[in-house]
Amino acid sequence: MHEVEARSGEDVSTEAQATDARGGAAATRQADGGTANRLDAGTYDILRDRMSTAAGELARRAQALNARRTEVFGGSELELAGNDRIRTEHNCVPRDIVQVGGLMLVGYNVHFGLKQTTDVGDVFALHRYVDGRFEHAPSDSLPGLLDDPSFVRDFTDLYRYYREAELLQLRRTGPLLLAVFQTGERLTDIRVLRWRISPAGTPEYVDAKGERDHVFPPAHDFEWTPAGRESHVLGRHPHISIEGTLFVETVGGSLTVKIENNTETGEGIYSEPVDEPLQSLADADVAYARVGPLILLRVLPYNETEYRYLVFNERSKEVVRLDGIGLSCQRLPEDQGLIFPGGYYLTTAPAGAAARTFDTDTTDLEFESVIRSPNGEDVLYAFHARAEGRTLLLPYNLIRKEVATPIPSHGYSLFEDGTMVVFRAQSDEPTRVHPMQVWRTPYLSETYAAAQPEVDGPLTRVGNAELVRGISDSLSLARMADEMAPGTAVFEAIVAACSRVADTYYWLDTEGLEALHEPLESLRTTAEQVIDEFERVEALREQARAAVADAATRVTTLVRRARGEAPGGATAWVTLLTELRRAHGSVESLRELRHVDLDRIDTLSAEVAESLAATGRRAVAHLSREDAFDDTRAAVEELATRAAEAGTVADTQPLGEQVDEHAEGLRVVTDVVGGLDISDATVRTELLERIGEVMGRVNRARAVLDGRRRELLEREGRAEFAAEFALLGQAVAGALAASGTPEECDEQLGRLLLQLENLESRFGAFDDFLAQLGEQREEIYETFSARKQAQLDERARHAERLVESAERILGTVSRRSATLTSLDEVNAYFATDPLVSKIRETAAELRTLGDSVRGEELEGRVKAARQEAARSLRDRADLYDAEGTVRLGRHRFGVNSQPIDLTLVPQDGALAFAITGTDYRAPVRDEAFDGTRDFWDQPLVSESPRMYRAEHLAATVLAAVDPAALRTAAADDGGLTALVRQHAEAAYDEGYDRGVHDHDAAAILTAVLGLREEADLLCFTPEVRAAAQLFWAYGTQEVRRTAWLTRAQSLARARRAFGPGPAVAELAAELSTHAGDFLQQSGLPAVDTGAVGRYLFEELAMGRPAFATSRAARELLADFRAALGGDHSAEAKEFSEDLRALGDDLTARHQLALAWLSAYAEARSAPTTDLAEAAAVELCGDAVERRDVAAPTSTTVTGLLGSHPRVSGGELPLRLDEFLARTEDFRTHRVPAHRAYTRARNSLLAAERERLRLDSFKPRVMSAFVRNRLIDEVYLPLIGDNLAKQLGTAGDDRRTDSQGLLLLLSPPGYGKTTLMEYVAARLGLVLVKVDGPALGHRTTSLDPAAAPDAAARREVEKVNLALEMGNNVFLYLDDIQHTSPEFLQKFIPLCDAQRRVDGVATTDGLPRTFDLRGKRFAVCMAGNPFTESGARFRIPDMLANRADVWNLGDVLSGKEEVFALSHIENALTSNPVLAPLAARERADIDLLVRLARGDESAQADRLAHPYTPADLEQVLSVLRKLLHVQQTSLKVNAAYIASATMDDTDRTEPPFRLQGSYRNTNKLAERIVPVMNDEELEALIDDHYLGEAQTLTTGAEANLLKLAELRGRLSSEQAARWQEIKRTYRAGATA
């Protein structure tokens, strides 16, 4: 067998030419297609290695599956079994052989000399193959075959009438056996005798008319498509387009095949010469056929007689000439390639190895038949040459993808069991001995194969033929990926093949069939990645190709111009050389492009360099003349003149560019001259001197230009700078206005600084400008920094306010949701309640402020509150009794419903701190707070014993609302009520009940308005009016009185015109000051001097002061004088004389008058409210003017709804002046003082809460907590039994001898703390958690002062606080393995009935014995079996003997299933797919777990929650994986517990410290996704425990090996290492 590149039979010279052509094409392909199909080295290596690995794994698994298939179904290779000979009576030429009925029918051609007739026995013979030998069989051995009379007659007639008749062939076609005879000179002159063969093999002669049955199948199983003129593509090198993929031409003396539609070149990937060089495109006859990835070409060049046949593979881009396909060609199975007489071609083989031919005679061979083995693995192709009777057998194996050694013969006979007998003629001469070959083959008959016994198994269920096809396709795919040169077509074919194989063979992922789908999917994914990468590379290469093409166009144009152009002067020569030099540089720059054609760049660079050198030589010849640089000199002189005359800086710019161009051109000429080989040194020197002289002129022109530019810059720059600086100031003002956020501040500052840098670069030549800009920079930076900091501070303050508000709302939401009675109510509340919406809005606002962390925290807490509400709802249904008690197991416990908080309560005449629900009391030691004693019994700011809150509300409205608005509201029905209600709603902290106090306030306000309307100035109290009269009469002088009167009247007019202004209040204050001084100096009774000033202003505003006098005061004086006997009575005169006798002593006179009037009022039981006014009237006499006001000032308000000591029977007595004075004093003094008291009280409580860390004692159940069956059925009953002893139960069976202790042991992560939080929350207990690691081993006392450090002291203080609270307390000591046994022994008394513990009071730090007998106080300790050093933890015996000890990590007897299920239930909230299950019916969880386990009795239609099929499948997929994780966790947990409880002396292996707790299960659960497969799940478990092992102090490797042993995943190397570690450990323990 030979690998070929060209057709078989080509002469040496032609083949050499074709090879050379292919070599050139290969070089082109490497530069173009090869580079196109290569990735970056790093990327390609990675993807190629990945693909090779996947392909190798696919091949390995497919071969392993094939080996198993062979074991199950058996394998029969094609092999030679033996050789033998058949002897005939006469010399004859063997023609054919065929099997009939288990015998061989052999046909010969015999040529007799003298014999006149030919008998049947002369042509046909029967033979039997027995025990490896051929035996002759009589002609009648098979009745109906050779002995049939009709056959004998037809045979005899055939040879009688056709003297030249010869046997051509014996053929089996379906049920017919044909004997074909040639009767004339032509092969078409035939007569065919035929028999019908029954299924049992019995022949029956039919007739001699079988010519129509003797038909060979088509030579080609595909159609040739002629390439017409519509496929012609014209151009310099025209070609024929084959489907736009392949391009063929026969012009230019060669047959060329190209893969690019490029008519500019005649090069391609394949070329060979043609006989006639001078031919056009249309002269050739071209046809093509597509067979999978192959394109077959049939080409007949002009004036040639033999077609040429070419095969092009789209994947390997290879063209091979195979003329054998012209004779006959068939597709190989599964599109694996082509087979033809003498060879075959594989589509998946790499270039150079795809085509294979055999050194055998293929003349006149045509396709006759194909025989397929029942196993589907082997196919036999038969090609037959009719004239010579030769047959060529080509056996092909689908799995190995190869043709075994061809078998040439003069016929073959195939038996039922696959035995094949081949007639091998050694020559064409007649002979009596004929050699035969016997072959064992896999080509069994279907009947024989079906009779073979079958073995049940997964391979049998798929079927041998189906397995062969799948294995063959897999191996083809692996070979394509591993051997074929990389290319886009190859990788696209790999992707398509992977998809086809995956879709065709359903059994790829069937268990027990080597899991071919895994490497297949990996191969497909990698191929897709390679295709994407190729597309990216192709885009880059296309860019490079376009850049090179553009450069080539420019270079070609420039080079042509340089060759054909003769510049007229030095400037023109310099310009041309400069362009060539720049073109050379641009070409070299293209080398930096990725995937650029470097050969093309080398060509272009060489072309430009050559042109530059040639042009340089021509330029030197020209520039050597004396006048060569005259034009340059003139141009430079003109530039210098224009530079000196430039008017603006802008005018100098183009001049500078022209100067630079001249300088650059001269440098180019200098470089070119320096690089040229000029033989005459004097020529070079003279030329360089001329260039230097011109360069000097250029430098002078540049100097003139630079000087002029500096001069202009100085003049123009200052004016421009002033304008730019002003614009900068405006920009700063605008930027400040636009800087509303810190981010905007940074953005605007950046823009301004950029503007400053631009100004500095533009005006850098001016030092004074730079100084101004520097100062401006500092000012701008400081301004914006201050603005940004202020905004950051405000944003932080705003965020803090939002968080504080949300915290308060969250508390309300949690309390409200705890009262809801159904899950629908909970969901509706959290979906629609405005408080919840407000929290979500706050979270969104926090995110906009950049505080996304706290925003997410708020949303998480809302979610947690919702889950807690649902959990509490379920708990109330499952655990709570109708009496409100909680049932834990068989015990009922009372529930404390008081929230844990700190309050102030009276104690021993003072206030003390108290923790609600407990016995904690601590006196308040704050002297400043003692000053607020007046408010201790006033809970509301708006109400006191002397003030009804409705009165305060009415007075507040009266003072706040304009009188006109009050009158308008009073005129409307309900108007005053609405107005009052509006103010009441705004004063939410004053405790107004809607419908009660607003109603009463409206009634009071109505009465007040009615009285005030007529009361004139009697609305001021008598004391105020009396003091005003006395001040006006005795404390003022006429001048001052006149001034005050004038000012008051003027301000009154202004008030009426424009409303009240500050001057009115200022004048009233002035009057108040003087009146107050007078009253103090005169020793008169103190009154509200502010009211005196206001009253005096109103009196003066009315005109001359005529003080309002009430009727009650006048009547009191009249009755008083009447009691004295009248004005002329002796008593009256004596009274008056006494007053006059006191002279100017106003104090004495006032005391005397007030004493007389008081004595009268007391004697007559008269009202005393007007005594002060009556005394003032008596004392002032005619010194002041008065006016009598008879309006009523008192009334009784009825119909009141509220309760207060001042309200009796719904009635409230009201005196206008007293009401106004009292409410004003309350509003202006009492209310602010009470608010100050409230702030001080709240501050005091907040500080104490902070000191006590009270919030840390509120049990908070984790949002992930799930009350599973294990907790309900096991843990809660156990805890209930213990708490019944410690707390006492509800009801008559309560124990009075409280005692006991609960001790929980388990590895970390089993929810000990969470469970205790839950129990404490449900019982309403204060949970005091003490951190064992913080206490440490050095803490041995309950005295905080003896603690070794601050952390330990804090924990000891917690213990003492718990003891001091006494009642309703749950003391929980966590991680006690880190504490001292001596410290733990301090709690032993709590386990006994005495329940007394010595500690230290937290209030005063003094020693104290805490008596907890009869108290609702419980203690729980929790620990881990190992200490931090890895040693086993030992509990003090005296404590363990008195405690109820339970291990939450161990499985209780009979509860194995519940314990295992708890891992699933606890992990629900950790996985987003399973999280909703935690709030649903528990029965659903049990049913879903059963469904996930494959329990056939579980029915999905029994689920309470309606799941869609997609949702249900997602849930079950995750649960299946979680069940696997659960089993791993349980195994690890059992091993951990066993290791922890084992004594060190009994160990045979290192301690196992990896854990399988709830925490581990939860961590794994949160990473499970539904689409994860088994290997990915195992990898997830591996990664998790690898990370866990890295945290161990020692023994990480041993623990991981033990884990692998538990999981059944120990490899042989790991098992050996594990045994070695155990041996080493045992040896160390023994030593």
Image (tube, rainbow, N blue to C red):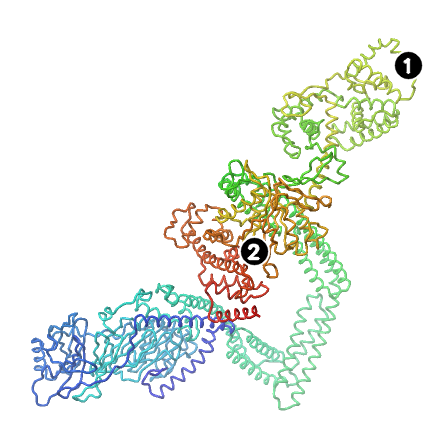
- Kindly indicate the quadrant of the structure image that contains residue 230: bottom left
Residue located beneath label 2 in the image: 1308
**Res. 1097 mark:** none
Instruction: Name the residue nearer the viewer: 611 or 823.
Output: 823
- Kindly indicate the quadrant of the structure image that contains residue 261: bottom left
- Which SS class for mark 1? helix
Residue located beneath label 1 in the image: 1137
Nearer the N terminus, badge 2 or badge 1?
A: 1
What amino acid is labelled 2 in the image?
Pro
**In the image, residue 1529 lies at what x, y percent?**
49, 58
Q: Residues within 10 Å of mark 1 (few under 14, many from 20)?
A: few
Instruction: Name the residue nearer the viewer: 1195 or 881.
Output: 881
Instruction: Name the residue nearer the viewer: 338 or 1458.
Output: 1458
Mark 2 vs mark 1: in front: 2
Q: Residues within 10 Å of mark 2 (few under 14, many from 20)?
A: some
Q: Is residue 394 above or below residue 1451?
A: below
Label 2 with label 1: CB-CB less than 8 Å: no
Q: Quadrant of the C terminus?
A: bottom right
**In the image, residue 1257 lies at what x, y percent?**
63, 46
- Which SS class for mark 2? loop
**In the image, residue 749 lies at what x, y percent?**
68, 56
Instruction: Name the residue nearer the viewer: 15 or 45.
Output: 45
Instruction: Report, in whole angstroms, how far the alpha carbon at label 2 lies from the one at label 1.
Output: 102 Å
